[in-house]
Image (cartoon, grey):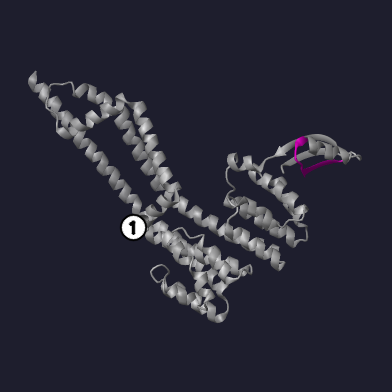
Amino acid sequence: MPLFTYKAKDSKGRITEEVVQADSKKEAVSFLKSKELQILTIKTLDTRMGKVFSGSISTAEKAAFCRFLATMLKSGLPLTESIDIIRQETKSKKFRQILHDTTFHIQKGESLSTVLAKYKTDFDTVFLTMIKAGEESGTLEKSFDYLAGQLLASYELTQKVKTSMMYPAVIIIAMVGNAFLMLGFVLPKMSDVFLDLNVEIPITTRFLLSMGKTVGENLALTFIILFVILFIVFMLFVIRSTRNIIMSYVVKLPVIGSVMDQLDTARFARTLSTLLKSGVPIMVALDVTSDVLRQPHLKKQAKEFSTQVAKGKSLSAILTKQKKSFPAIMIQTIKAGERSGSLEVVLEELAKFYEMEVDYSLKRATALLEPLLMLVIGVAVGVMVVMLITPIYSIVGGLEQGF
């Protein structure tokens, strides 16, 4: 049944803005008139359209939502009123629509976790599990507090990775753009001059000039081919099966593999710690935590952890069999946490440690990558000079001798 958001004036002249559910807009109007409301505006609240056209909800937005909601609930405000206040301040159109829908269904008697479960593309399993645990234990404000911390840590970690990759990405894009400009615009003009001359040209130079001429004469086709290649590469990363195959090779690379291991270790520790703090049983927490891992082989291994815990094994004993995937220092620290009964605290400290390790590894990798990229650029320019400029001097010399 669709939702309609409306603005109306009551018998006392007060303006109200709420949501109503009805089979049609006409039925919604009739219902509001029966309540003696003067309708000012009414429109369909289509959350499905929001999903398609309004983009996704960012991690930063969800972290802010959790932080504000935790604060309001701690101060004693009702859940629906707290969500409504946040909705009015939210800039994201899609998030506003979801919060509209959430408020309406909570007032109808549904739980918050049940309503948000309808938006699984926006709220992951970790988010929904923690909210459900908070509702069941009566500590919803604590769950939102923990979620805010977990989301903020995840956001900061992601931003560190993006920032570190920014410089190499700009250099590589500039190199590709420069190569395309040379092939598409500079070399075709040079080829028109030198290929028509009745002089001997080195085979490498002739090949480069011929390629430039071909690209220059077929720019539209070149653009189409380039677009198709980029689209295929994009789809390879979107489709899960091909992405997993690519990831299985990427993780074997020296520096990248190490950073990805640290990222997954940090995610595993942070997520499991947050879930255990929220009162989620360890078997459920392990199942949910396995979903946040990015490497396919790690995710497959983690899916079996809850089954082994159900058989009576400790987490440290399980991880000991996965020494290639999880570092020894992490296993020993978890073992100490299990003995002292403070596993969630130990996991949080491990998460902080490996998040710092990711930061340091990225800085080292970037520092190493900068001179390597400069060397590649230098070699590329040198090859271009040897293949084009040197033969040009030979051609000019040959022409002078001819005169």
> Is residue 40 part of the magenta span, yes or no?
no
Asked if 330 appears above or below 78 in the picture, the reply is below
On the rendered structure, is 124 left or right of 304? right
Image-based side of 201 in relation to 94, left or right: left
Image side of residue 21 versus residue 179, left or right: right
Q: Which residue is mark 1?
A: 253
Q: Residue furthest right?
A: 12
Classify mark 1: residues with Cα within 10 Å, few (<14), some (14-19) or many (20+): few
Residue type at mark 1 is Leu
Can you give x and y, in whole percent of width and height, for residue 305 in the image?
49, 70
Tell me the quadrant of the picture where the N terminus can be found: top right
Q: Nearer the viewer, residue 261 or 103?
A: 103
Extreme bottom residue here? 339
Q: Which residue range is magenta in the image?
A: 14-25
Residue 63 location, x and y as percent? 61, 55
Residue 80 position (above or below residue 320): above
Q: Secondary structure at mark 1?
A: loop
Image quarter of the C terminus: top left
When asked about the image quadrant of residue 378, the answer is top left
Asked whether the viewer can see residue 34, the reply is yes
Could you tell me residue 43's position as x and y percent?
A: 73, 36
The answer to whether 237 is drawn above or below residue 338 in the figure is above
Position of residue 382 in the picture relative to residue 394 (left or right): right
What residue appears at the point 57 percent right and 72 percent down from the top-left corner? 345
Q: From the top left corner, tell me how far across and down residue 117 is, in percent.
A: 64, 54
